[in-house]
Image (tube, coloured by chain):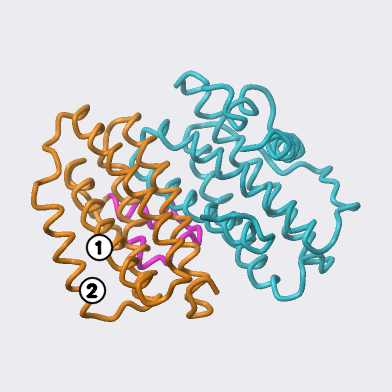
Chain colours: A orange, B cyan
Amino acid sequence: MIERRAALKALLAAPLIPLAARAEARDYASAGEVLAEIDRLEGELDARLATLAASFPAAAALAASVRADHDRHRRARVALRRRLRLAEAGPSFPRAQAATTQRVAAGRGSVDALRALAQDLVHAYAEGLPAIKDAQGVDVLARHMVDDARHLAILQMWTETEQPGG
Amino acid sequence: MGESRREFMLATARAAGVAGPMLGLLAGTESPARTEGNDLEILSAALLLEHHAIALYGFGLKRALFPPGLRAYATEFRGDHQGHRDTQIAIIEERGVAAPVPRDDYDFEHAPAGDEFVRLALEIEIAAQRAYTGLISRIRTDDYLLSAAFILVDEVRHMTVWQRVLGLRIY
C-alpha cells in the first residue's frame, strides 16, 4: 500500500484532486468490497435525495432521474456479480436502505450533505476500479461513474447557490 | 447523441489532431482491439484532446471570449486539463514512447465570443469524456487506472457545467 501511494504521489502531479485526498485514496481488497460500498453509498444517496425532494419540489426531477440511473446500475451490478461469481448483494440491503431513509429523514438533508455523499460515491467508483480486475467490469462501472459524476457536478452547482435547481 | 452533435464533436477531435480508428472510437462506431499499440493510440488521442483544450481555454481567456461570470470556471478547467496533460505524458513516456506535442497550427482566430465559444469548449469536453470512457477499461496498471478515473470525473464535471450554462438537459 505504501508503495502504491508513493507511486500515486509521484505520478499524479496533476491537480485532479487534492494531493492529500489522493494520498489517502482507499485501497479496496476485492471487487466484492467495491460493489458493496457502491451499494451502500448509492442507497444512502437515493434516500437523502428522496428526503430533499419531499422538502423542495425543485429537487424531485433530479431525484427521480438519479433513482432511475441507480436502478439501472443496480441491475447491471447484479449481472456483474454473477459473471464474476461474487456473492449477491445481501438481502439486508433493502432493509438497510429503509433504515437509512429513517435516519436521514431525522437528520439534516442539506444540499451540501448530499454533495458530500455523492462525492463519496464517485470516489468509491474511481478508487474501486483497480480492484475489479476485469476489463468488462471496469467498463460497466466506469460508465456508471460517469452518470454519478454528472449527478455530483449538478449537486456541486446547487451547493454554490444552496438552492435545489438553482 | 444526435448526428449533428456527433459530427461537431468529431470535427473538434479532428481539429485536435485525432485521426484514424480513434475517430471511430469517439463516434462509437469502432471498438479497436485491445492491443498495446491501440492503447497507445488511445492515450495519444486523449493527450491531443488535452493539448487542444488547454489551447482553446487559453485563447478564450486571453481574448475574453468566455461570457462574463464564467471566467472562473474556464480558468479552473484549464488548470484541470494542464494536470491531465502532465499525467498523460507521464503514462505515455513510461511506456517508452514519445508523447505527442501540441499542434502548432490551432486556428481559433475566428472563434465566436459568448455562448458559441462555450459551445466549442463543451465539444472538446465531450470528446475528452468519450475518449477516457473508451480508454479506461484497457488500462492494465492500477495507478494509471486510478488517475484516468479521476480525469474522467473532471471531464464529466466540465461537460455538465457547460451543458447547464448553455441550457442543455443535464438530467
Q: Quadrant of residue B20?
A: top right
Q: Residues within 10 Å of mark 2 (few under 14, many from 20)?
A: some
Q: Quadrant of residue B9?
A: top right
Q: Nearer the viewer, residue A30 or A143?
A: A143
The chain holding disc 1 is A
Segment colored magenta: A4-23
At which x and y percent is residue A101?
Answer: 21, 67
Dots 2 and 1 on the same chain = yes
Residue type (three-letter) at the residue carrying disc 2: Val
The chain holding disc 2 is A
Instruction: State how far apart marks 2 and 1 are (Cα).
Output: 8 Å
Q: Nearer the viewer, residue B27 or A25?
A: B27
Relative horizontal placement of residue B75, taking residue A159 as reference (left or right): right
Which residue corresponds to the image point at 18% horizontal and 49% vertical from the top-left? A36
Q: Circle 1 is placed at which residue position?
A: A44
Above or below, B66 against A13 in this view is: below
Mark 2 in CB contact with mark 1 (< 8 angstroms): yes
Q: Circle 2 is placed at which residue position?
A: A104
Q: Nearer the viewer, residue B70 or A109?
A: A109
Residue type (three-letter) at the residue carrying disc 1: Glu
At which x and y percent is residue A72?
Answer: 34, 42
